[in-house]
Image (cartoon, rainbow, N blue to C red):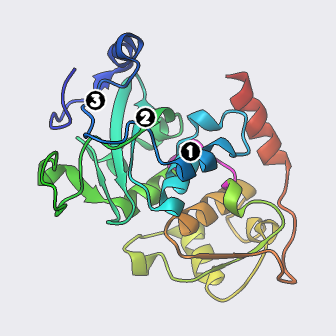
Amino acid sequence: MRDFEESTLWHVSEFERVRSQSGGSGFAHLRGATVLPTTLLTDLRRLDSGAASAEPLEVVAACLRHHEPALLCLQYEDLVWPVTLFPTQMLYHSPRDLAQASRASLTRLTLLSAEPPGVRPPGHWMHERIAASQHYRPLLPLLWSLALDGPRPTLLAEIAGTAAYRALRSAEAEGVSLSGALGSAAQRLRRETVSLRDISRWPGMSVERASRLLNGLYLASALLATRAHPAARAEPRSLRALWRATKLRR
């Protein structure tokens, strides 16, 4: 099994073979914890989807909430893409830039495993397992890429339900360019506090596009979700019910 420093990705069949033999992903681990922190594991277990264990965006969101690093092994087509998140540093480590992956393939991205990181972030006082600098990348573009083009078409569990939303900062201020209807909706959210249902009715928007936009703002820490605002409304259920049924059939 290749190490983290390799630029090539591994086939799922090899990943599964090593996992069946060793009980792990086959990646080199740091000395110390062999499981994720209890608080993060508890959050992952409470996710509201029957297929949550394979949902990349929910796991990424949980890591961000707890500021905990984690190695996520993602299935991209027939390959395994190892991505190590460092929320505190707003970096991720990967042999290739996942934010540049095919949009069509991102929609089918699934989570194979989540485990403690096998590398440390740049500048860590313990230099062991700090990887090559060119494999550390800004986390924000990846978060937006997963939110807008990943497999999840519905709101993340943390911001779903009866709520109203407002953008705290513009996407452009974070270095992310949103064009067309998404860009217009993001700008309008700076001025208005509205429900998902209202956003979905704006020009060029839909329930799915609105959900993806709100997920991106949430992951970028640029979203205010409030349950008590007069504009708070229950989210439309049809898309979420269809998505849950599709995931459970897989």
- Measured in 3D between alpha carbons, the distance from the residue under mark 3 to the one under mark 2, in whole angstroms, is 13 Å
Which secondary structure type mostly characterizes the magenta part of the structure?
Answer: loop
Q: Earlier in the sequence, mark 3 or mark 2?
A: 3
205 and 243: which is toward the camera: 243
Question: What is the x, y in percent for residue 1?
Answer: 22, 20
Question: What is the x, y in percent for residue 38?
Answer: 54, 47
> Could you tell me which secondary element the residue under label 3 belongs to?
loop
> Could you tell me which secondary element the residue under label 1 belongs to?
helix
Q: Which mark is residue 27?
A: 3
Q: Which mark is residue 41?
A: 1
Foreground tag (3 vs 2): 3
Q: Which residue is the site of mark 2? A: 74
Q: Earlier in the sequence, mark 3 or mark 1?
A: 3
- Measured in 3D between alpha carbons, the distance from the residue under mark 2 to the one under mark 1, in whole angstroms, is 18 Å
The image quadrant of residue 72 is top left
Q: Which residues are magenta?
A: 149-156
Q: Is residue 21 magenta?
A: no
Give the amino acid type for the residue marked by disc 3 in the picture: Phe
